[in-house]
Amino acid sequence: MTPREGAALRPQNVHGARRAHIPRPASGGESTASAHELFDRLAAADRGTPVWQALRDELVHRHLPLVHFLVRRFRGRGEPLDDLVQVATIGLIKAVDRFDPQRGIEFSTYATPTVVGEVKRHFRDRGWAIKVPRRLQENMLVVSRASAELFGLLSRAPTIAELAKKAALTEEDVLEAIESSHAYTTVSLDAELDDAAAAANPRHGVDTQAALESIEDRESLRPLLGKLDERERQIILLRFFANMTQSEIAAEVGVSQMHISRLLGRTLARLREGLGNGE
Amino acid sequence: MSTPASTSANGHPAHLDTVVLTLPASSAYLSVLRTATAGLAARLQFTLDEIEDLRIAVDEACAMLLADGESEEHDLTCRFELATDLITVTVSVSAGSPSLPSRDTFAWQVLTALAGAVDASVVDDQLTIQLTKRRGRAP
């Protein structure tokens, strides 16, 4: 390793990542050049040519230890390490493609946010926000089920105390689970909704036109409601124009109350943003 | 103001406890208010629906306040007054020259649907929104 390479990959970044067995790309001649030289040559090469491809492969390969180092932070969060490495490598490739060696910053400095961002996005897309421990995930599911069951029994939403008893958790745990459910994010929610959409068959038709009659800013609101997806719009209309409770809407739409709550919060925030910008 | 909410400031008969939080007037701190709201409403045996509605309402009210007065230099004050079957949440912030939110807007309708009784006032440069949510049927 030349000194310049050593600088490009800071020692602490390499630490512990040597176990990676990724086959070297079959590239001739580049293996002895420094990363800086390679980046310069990559910048000079025509994109898509075999030369460019070989340089890019070599640079990606050289920085795989950085990927392994960064991915270690995300271990034990319910995703297989191999998947995370793969996702992070995509981030690395993006960084290699966008890196401008003229700007005088180290590649590792430049690449770190891109790689970490890619891994975080993966977690978001998988539905769980980062840092939701398994115990919490389980509690959320238990509370969500208990809530639906109790609603069926009581014909009203349960209290926290009732939920705690039913779920065999402390009230604190129940509150924590509800709290965390708001961190449970968008993509998987939409997936859940798509599944639920088939089962949903709303009895309560809402006359949007009439509902909006009394609202001053309806002209700004209408296009915003139009931009929501069908399910979000339905939930907003049922809650605010048909005056149904969250639990009633949950039963109607066929998803959990906690899910309705999340969607309401999220959709209102979006409407708020739109109304604010419209003024 | 004519809503029942404004009378609670004079001391609701069944008034139990008061919790006051002062935070920087920044949306970054709203999660603290949400958590406090849920925890306090749970103490009063509110149902999950009521808790979640109130939590969203507090969010909405703060968004209205911060639209005018988001600034880390100012304080957002939140006062929770707990009664046996009633919680009053009063949020206020000082803003340049705050305007009273209109009651005919969607945002106001949302607040009313979520909280029950809503009131707003401007005193000097202080914009205040008060939400009063009553517990439904006793469990």
Image: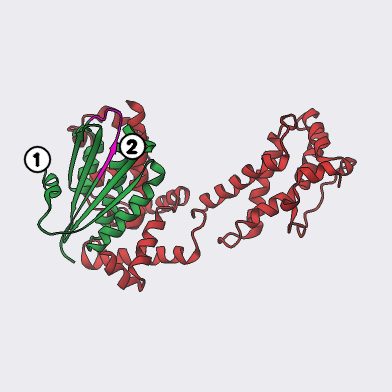
Q: 10 Å neighbourhood of mark 2: few (<14), some, or many (≥20)?
A: many
Tag 1 secondary structure:
loop
Q: Residue at x 45, y 64 (%)?
A: A136
Label 1 marks which chain's residue? B
Which residue type does callout 1 highlight? Ser
Label 2 marks which chain's residue? B
- Residue A212 at x, y percent in the picture: 21, 34
| Residue numbers of the magenta segment | B91-99
| Depicted B127 relative to depicted B48: above or below | above
* A213 displayed left or right of B22: left
Q: Residue at x 25, y 35 (%)?
A: B126
Q: Earlier in the sequence, mark 1 or mark 2?
A: 1
**A76 drawn magenta:** no
Which residue type does callout 2 highlight? Leu
- Residue A103 at x, y percent in the picture: 71, 30
Q: Which residue is mark 1?
A: B2
Chain letter for green, please: B
Q: Which residue is mark 2?
A: B66
Q: Nearer the viewer, residue B45 or B8?
A: B8
Q: 10 Å neighbourhood of mark 1: few (<14), some, or many (≥20)?
A: few
